[in-house]
Image: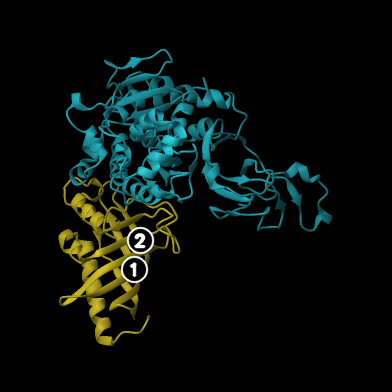
Amino acid sequence: MSTIDYEHLIQEDKVHGSLYTDEAIYEDEIEKIFYSSWVFIGHESEIKKRGDYVTRDIGRSSVIMVRGKDEDIQVIVNRCQHRGNLLCNESQGNKRNFTCPYHGWVFGLNGDLLDVSYPGGFDRPLEELNLEVLVTDSYRGFVFASFKEPTISFDDYLGNGKKLIDRSCNMAPNGKIDLKGGWIRQHFDANWKMLPENDTDGYHVNYVHQSFVRAIDSQYGDFVGAEDSIKGVIKNWGNGHTEIDFAPGYTKTLDWLGSTPEKAKSYVDSMREAYGQEKADQMLYDGPAHACIFPNLFLAEMNIVIFQPTGAHSAVQWSTPMFLEGAPELDFKLLRQSEGALGPASFLLADDASIAERAQKALGAGTPWCDLSRGLNRETEDTDGVKTSHMTDETSNRGFWHHYRDVMMGELS
Amino acid sequence: MNQPVSEAIAKQLEAFIIQEAKLADEGQYEAWEGLWADDAVYWVPLKEGDDPTQQVSHLYDNRTRIATRIRQLMTGYRYSQLPISGMRRLISNYEFFAEDDKRYRVEANFFLPEYSIQSIHDFRIWSGRYVYTLSAKDDGFQIHTKKVLLVNGTEPVPTMAFLI
């Protein structure tokens, strides 16, 4: 039974610094968020053929996302049921089955124990020692899983998050994205929650990224002027899902791609053919989602990002370009844009990491509270309960924290 | 291709690379940028064998993006290198080759201790292999490609905003 008073630590307009630094809170999060309900694992396009797999780290566990013999996708705990050895040490590959390197036990792609070596000394039924399989579901290729039977259905968990995933996937003429570009993994010496907080914080761009804004002419230049001139909006979609919607602030079609309809003619043509001119032109103006799906997925415009907690004081951010099926001519540009924005040597995230690490250092001392009130005086709520405000407001972070509080208090999972 | 080079040329190539390393270590950004040829590629792949047209890299800069990188470092607001990390890299195990079209390829191992003082004051070790393509220019050389193969490029790596 938890003795941590989350109701006190997370209030309407402030959060307590210990939420980022307390080891007991971190352990509680691993149990209540990462071992009890839906988390993002990976995308179906990463495992196209039967036997293709990738490994991911969830909570303290390694898991394998694998395409099985009926083309179905399963998420299996990467731990032999015999003596607990790691079955799969590679981050990706293709296998006919999983053979434990320790004593040679063989498991099928669905986790079933198929064979044990020297069976003379083993008279248990094999099915008693199948691998642990997670509850798995997917939406538009995004695979989510839960270690325990979740108390909330997958549909209810995703909620409005479906609209955000739709917005990103629909940037492809056939509605399908392809994560085949490989993952950069960036280490942060900061608590994992700073990643979703910062990624939908529209307030820091002009400060943390001042060197970027000064050195580089990009679409983000539209979002750093005087307060009244910033037209982007911040959104709390509910369930901890949050967004910066840049679309109202863009000034031209394909601003988000740093391109023009003339330069990207073949892409624009295939989008118009797929969706009709009027709808396609609106989508090409608005661009993909910039949104976090609680707890660990970030639809980062033309990239997909995963947040991985590795301790109270460290985290890893995974990033990969979001390629669009039917528009391979964009791949090279998307690769270079991904490297420019995300990863340890990038023009943006390198600075976010240093600033997050400074916060991690300072949060443990002095006044323990962090203010979270910005925009309470002007945010609006629509009939769906979606809250919207000025891009620099903390509507998104309140959305994250208040959902987090409900999950940690056991009021949701 | 892949002909050996004379001892005299090898010495000059090594001296040039030592100079390039010194400029990077000391944050002499404009001088470092001046070493690059117009067709420059400054590349840190995740691993050997990666295709930069298909797979994401830690960085893959052409000449324009090298200029952008330097411009950003010189704004005075690049927090991930403010102040610049303490660095003194060692380069060793050189191999020198003459290639076609008057270019030289130099491969060497590097060992780069970094004292990261922007946030948590962490002492870090970076290591791997440099692969340069160089050609003669004026009294020295210019860099066409510098590929940096980290020994741990596929693992989580911390901020790498300095010139590696």
Q: CA distance from mark 2 to mark 1?
A: 8 Å
Q: Quadrant of residue A257?
A: top left
Residue B110 image label: 1
Q: Nearer the viewer, residue A80 or A172?
A: A172
Residue A388 image label: none
- Which kind of residue does numbered mark 2 sit on? Trp
Chain that is coloured yellow in the picture: B
x 28%, y 66%: residue:
B89
Whichever of callouts 2 and 1 sits on the residue coming sooner in the sequence is: 1
Q: Is residue A50 left or right of residue A174?
A: right
x 41%, y 44%: residue:
A317
Q: Nearer the viewer, residue A59 or A197?
A: A197
Residue A343 visible in this rendered orientation of the protein:
no
Q: Is residue A210 above or below residue A203?
A: below
Task: Find disc 2 in the rendering and name its residue.
Answer: B126
The disc numbered 2 marks a residue on which chain? B
Q: Quadrant of residue A152?
A: top right
Q: Is residue A41 left or right of residue A102?
A: left
Percent x, y of residue B13: 25, 77
The disc numbered 1 marks a residue on which chain? B
x 36%, y 54%: residue:
B58
